[in-house]
């Protein structure tokens, strides 16, 4: 569809899906008309994927046209939220800096402000890259994506009251038993206001969401009509977090790299207007199944209902340290350059 005018592919009561180049769709919009651009653009991967990722060296240049349009179409109090995974250098156990360079470019060259950085921790992420993590054992698995929350001014509309979390068990115990105000060893002065029960906790900027969708209506719809599901979907809870925190009902949300239109599905459910754009027709054919064309949803399993209200916990790194049975192996002298014998 590149080089052709965008086609209105599907519409709902609140939203529209376009097949075509999102630059064309955005250029046709009025300036300062969008409250939130929520998207996960193709990552600058070192191995080419079938959903159109750019190579690392060209990524920043490729992104410039999008940055210009994001800046133009966003309201002054609007937000740009970008979910962007990292990448490894080809054939080496060292990381690319492309996503940090993109952040700096957006702020220093296009006038965006970094409202806050978030880290999406996917507890179910596989231990990759296997060569460095599983075979040579010289790196740990990459379990987070960076999520940049950017704004045109330092004062975008936002409220963390929209994304509060239940109190932890330890906080519930503190509230029940009381707390003595004191100066902590770190120098922080904990006042008596710390023990006030506000009903829920302010979340951190670490967002724990497993990406384990396996039997959703969307997947069953794709299977039913015989098309391949989008291979790089983010879980609905990720865009929902920011749609809730950064927009009001009736605001316009846009995803210029929509894929299977998870952002649109969330916006529709929350009463926001929305626009989703992608260049791959089969992905958008599957996306239509998110809006009233899916079979009836199957009930959630007992395990998923249990997990839905649970905290995902990161183990303390020292749980297995200093065991008597441990025998410390020497570090590889060449830094893992060559594989050791199994």
Image (spheres, rainbow, N blue to C red):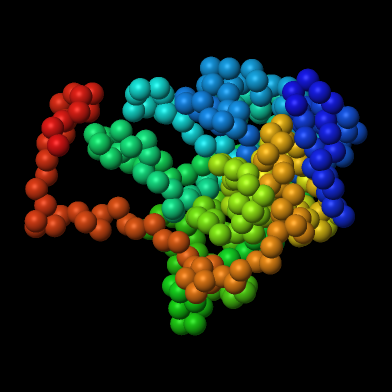
Q: Quadrant of the N terminus?
A: top right
Residue shown at 62%/72% (left/top)? 198
Res. 244 visible in picture: no
Q: Quadrant of the C terminus?
A: top left
Q: Can you say whether 50 is above or below 195 in the image?
A: above
Seen from the viewer's position, the closer of residues 150 and 274 is 274
Residue shown at 50%/74% (left/top)? 302
**Residue located farthest toward the right when viewing the structure as drawn:** 30
Res. 304 visible in picture: yes
Instruction: Tell whether 123 sits left or right of 218.
Output: left
Q: At which x and y percent is residue 201? A: 58, 66
Q: At which x and y percent is residue 155? A: 75, 44
Seen from the viewer's position, the closer of residues 99 and 137 is 137
Instruction: Tell whether 342 sits left or right of 275.
Output: left
Q: How many marks?
A: 0
**Residue located farthest toward the bottom when viewing the structure as drawn:** 176
Residue shown at 82%/45% (left/top)? 10
Q: At which x and y percent is residue 268? A: 78, 56
Seen from the viewer's position, the closer of residues 315 and 238 is 238
Q: Can you say whether 125 is above or below 84 in the image?
A: below
Q: At which x and y percent is residue 194? A: 54, 69
Instruction: Tell whether 155 sits left or right of 179.
Output: right
Residue shown at 90%/33% (left/top)? 30
């Amino acid at each position: 569809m590149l080089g052709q005018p965008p086609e209105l592919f599907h519409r709902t009561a609140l939203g529209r899906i376009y097949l075509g180049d999102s630059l064309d769709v955005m250029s046709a919009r009025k300036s300062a008309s969008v409250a939130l651009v929520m998207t996960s653009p193709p990552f600058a991967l070192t191995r080419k994927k079938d959903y159109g990722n750019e190579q690392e060296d060209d990524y920043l240049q490729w992104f410039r046209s999008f940055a210009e349009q994001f800046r133009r179409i966003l309201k002054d109090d609007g937000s740009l939220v970008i979910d962007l995974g990292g990448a490894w250098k080809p054939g080496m156990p060292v990381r690319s800096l492309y996503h940090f360079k993109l952040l700096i470019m957006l702020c220093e060259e296009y006038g965006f402000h970094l409202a806050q950085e978030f880290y999406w921790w996917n507890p179910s992420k596989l231990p990759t890259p296997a060569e460095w993590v599983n075979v040579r054992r010289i790196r740990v698995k990459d379990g987070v994506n960076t999520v940049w929350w950017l704004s045109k001014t330092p004062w975008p509309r936002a409220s963390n009251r929209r994304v509060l979390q239940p109190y932890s068990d330890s906080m519930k115990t503190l509230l029940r038993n009381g707390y003595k105000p004191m100066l902590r060893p770190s120098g922080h002065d904990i006042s008596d206001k710390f023990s006030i029960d506000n009903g829920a906790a302010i979340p951190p900027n670490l967002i724990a969401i497993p990406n384990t969708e396996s039997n959703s209506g969307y997947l069953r719809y794709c299977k039913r009509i015989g098309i391949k599901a989008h291979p790089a979907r983010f879980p609905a809870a990720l865009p929902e977090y920011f749609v809730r925190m950064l927009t009001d009902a009736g605001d316009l949300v846009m995803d210029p790299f929509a894929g299977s239109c998870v952002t649109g599905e969330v916006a529709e459910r929350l009463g926001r207007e929305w626009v989703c754009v992608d260049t791959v027709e089969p992905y958008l054919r599957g996306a239509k199944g998110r809006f009233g064309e899916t079979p009836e949803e199957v009930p959630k399993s007992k395990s998923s209902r249990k997990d839905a209200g649970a905290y995902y916990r990161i183990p303390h790194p020292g749980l297995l340290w200093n065991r008597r049975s441990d025998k410390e192996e020497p570090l590889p002298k060449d830094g893992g350059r060559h594989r050791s014998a199994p």
